[in-house]
């Protein structure tokens, strides 16, 4: 791999360099483990991505499990579950990009967001806190007495659907109160039952060393988060950087200027990019990238659609909420990375009843190499085995011919 000396920052990147740099920063230039991936392999990926986004859609598998598969290949899902929900805990749930699994060491950098919960959380959360502060305090007390506990369990303790304890003690209000407390950092996710959160107090979940760590001021936290975003992106615009951890635009603009002045970010121009870009000083550009991966819709590599198009020339839209008859490529579509290009896209579904991985459609990108089909089939077979399915069934829609198994 080739990097640049900190003495002489690079001033311009070609489109190909920017593409390979972005892939390397996200871990796609790293070799997959020869054996079963272990905690060390997980840490390596987390050091690259910074977080795993959580999403409720389960047509294939939960979103936070897929980025590890994309970078490591088949891995035991329990590896991620233990890191997130068992001691010694290395990951915790909080609002990073969206709802995310993040390294526990990042928790102090997000305390500014927790402290501003009554100002920046969603409307229903703010409303329940302002209109019913005692109700919120009572929900917190229930978590303290009975955690780990779900919203449904708290509701049942107060009369369930009969609402014997008053009109506020139903699932929806309890859930909103818990989400406010979660945003404020007063409760956290101890574990999950299926996809249902079980809440508990942070002091019973997070490592004591993390809770005892000093709280950086807001500006310092933003600078550190922007540097982390730059490390994960390799090269990025100001909008890219602030979006990684969803920082306020005006604050991010000021902090980026400070980071440039201190040499922690390098300004750079990128061929074909309209906006100025910023380079992490430790970024490296591999001469080649030999990746082969199915990339999840909520993977950091592609979650910002404008950036995906800018870097890969790949127009990508998630069509989950588009009426079926209006979808172009399908419901849950994964781009296929081969080498340093996104060369195809497949609409996938894990048919657990039939025990097969369904390819609802497969489309090749313009200029996709001849080996796209066979390489994609190999990755689909690997994914099917990882998901505990017996094979791949191709429905035949799209312009990319696949055989299935």
Image: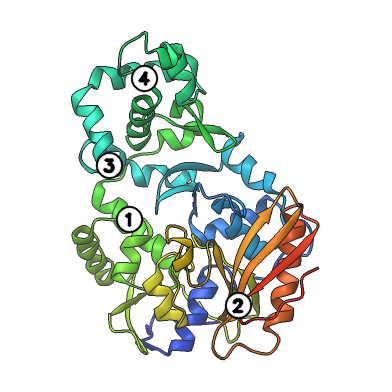
> At numbered mark 3, what does the secondary structure look like: helix, strand or loop?
loop
Vertical side of 94 occupied by 369: above or below? below
Work out whether 58 lies above or below 27. above
Q: Are marks 3 and 1 in contact (CB under 8 Å)?
A: no
The answer to which of marks 2 and 1 sits earlier in the sequence is: 1
Viewer-proximal residue, 341 or 387?
387
Instruction: Judge the density around disc 3: few (<14), some (14-19), many (≥20) Cα neighbours within 10 Å.
Output: some
Which of the two discs, 2 and 3, sits closer to the camera? 2
For mark 2, give the secondary structure: loop
Dot 3 or dot 1, earlier in sequence: 3
**Helix, strand or loop under label 4:** helix
10 Å crowding of disc 4: few (<14), some (14-19), many (20+): many
> Residue at image x 58%, y 36%?
85
Q: Is residue 93 above or below residue 344?
A: above
Q: Mark 1 sits on what residue?
A: 246
Is there any visible trace of residue 82 in the rendered image?
Answer: yes
Q: Which residue is mark 4?
A: 139
Q: CA distance from mark 2 to mark 3?
A: 40 Å
Rendered view: 60 above or below 403: above
Picture disc at residue 122: 3
* Residue 37 seen in render: no
Distance of label 1 from label 4 (alpha carbons): 28 Å
Q: Position of residue 211 (x, y in %)?
A: 42, 33
Nearer to us: label 4 or label 2 = 2
Q: Quadrant of residue 231?
A: bottom left
Labels 1 and 4 touching (C-beta < 8 A)? no
The residue singled out by tag 2 in the image is 398
User: Do the residues bearing badges 2 and 1 touch, measured as CB atoms within 8 Å?
Assistant: no
Marks 4 & 2, CB-CB < 8 Å contact: no
Going from the N terminus, do you reach mark 1 or mark 4 first?
A: 4
Of badges 1 and 4, the one in the foreground is 4
In the rendered structure, the answer to whether residue 181 lies left or right of residue 398 reads: left
């Amino acid at each position: 791999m080739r990097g640049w000396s900190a003495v002489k920052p690079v001033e311009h990147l070609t489109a190909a360099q920017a593409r390979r740099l972005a892939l390397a920063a996200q871990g796609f230039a790293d070799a997959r483990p020869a054996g079963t991936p272990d905690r060390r392999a997980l840490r390596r990926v987390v050091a690259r991505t910074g977080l795993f986004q959580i999403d409720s859609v389960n047509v294939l598998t939960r979103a936070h499990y897929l980025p590890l598969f994309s970078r490591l290949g088949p891995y035991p899902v329990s590896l991620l579950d233990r890191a997130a929900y068992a001691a010694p805990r290395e990951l915790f749930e909080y609002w990073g990009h969206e709802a995310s699994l993040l390294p526990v060491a990042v928790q102090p950098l997000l305390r500014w967001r927790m402290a501003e919960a009554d100002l920046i959380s969603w409307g229903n959360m703010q409303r329940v806190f302002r209109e019913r502060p005692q109700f919120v305090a009572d929900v917190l007390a229930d978590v303290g007495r009975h955690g780990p506990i779900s919203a449904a369990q708290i509701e049942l303790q107060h009369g369930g659907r009969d609402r014997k304890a008053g009109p506020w003690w139903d699932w929806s209000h309890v859930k909103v109160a818990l989400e406010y407390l979660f945003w404020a950092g007063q409760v956290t996710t101890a574990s999950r039952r299926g996809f249902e959160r079980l809440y508990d107090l942070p002091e019973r979940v997070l490592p004591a060393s993390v809770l005892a760590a000093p709280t950086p001021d807001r500006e310092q936290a933003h600078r550190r988060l922007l540097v982390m975003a730059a490390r994960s992106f390799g090269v990025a615009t100001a909008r890219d950087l602030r979006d990684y951890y969803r920082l306020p635009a005006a604050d991010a603009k000021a902090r980026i200027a400070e980071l440039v002045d201190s040499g922690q970010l390098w300004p750079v121009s990128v061929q074909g990019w309209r906006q100025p870009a910023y380079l992490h000083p430790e970024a490296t550009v591999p001469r080649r990238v030999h990746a082969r991966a199915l990339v999840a819709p909520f993977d950091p590599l592609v979650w910002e659609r404008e950036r995906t198009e800018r870097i890969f020339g790949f127009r990508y839209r998630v069509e989950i909420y588009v009426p079926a008859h209006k979808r172009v490529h399908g419901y849950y579509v994964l781009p296929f990375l081969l080498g340093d290009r996104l060369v195809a896209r497949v609409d996938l579904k894990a048919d657990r009843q039939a025990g097969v991985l369904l390819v609802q459609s497969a489309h090749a990108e313009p200029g996709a190499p001849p080996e796209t089909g066979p390489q994609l089939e190999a990755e689909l077979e690997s994914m099917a085995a990882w998901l505990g399915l017996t094979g791949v069934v191709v429905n035949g829609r799209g312009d990319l011919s696949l055989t299935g198994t």
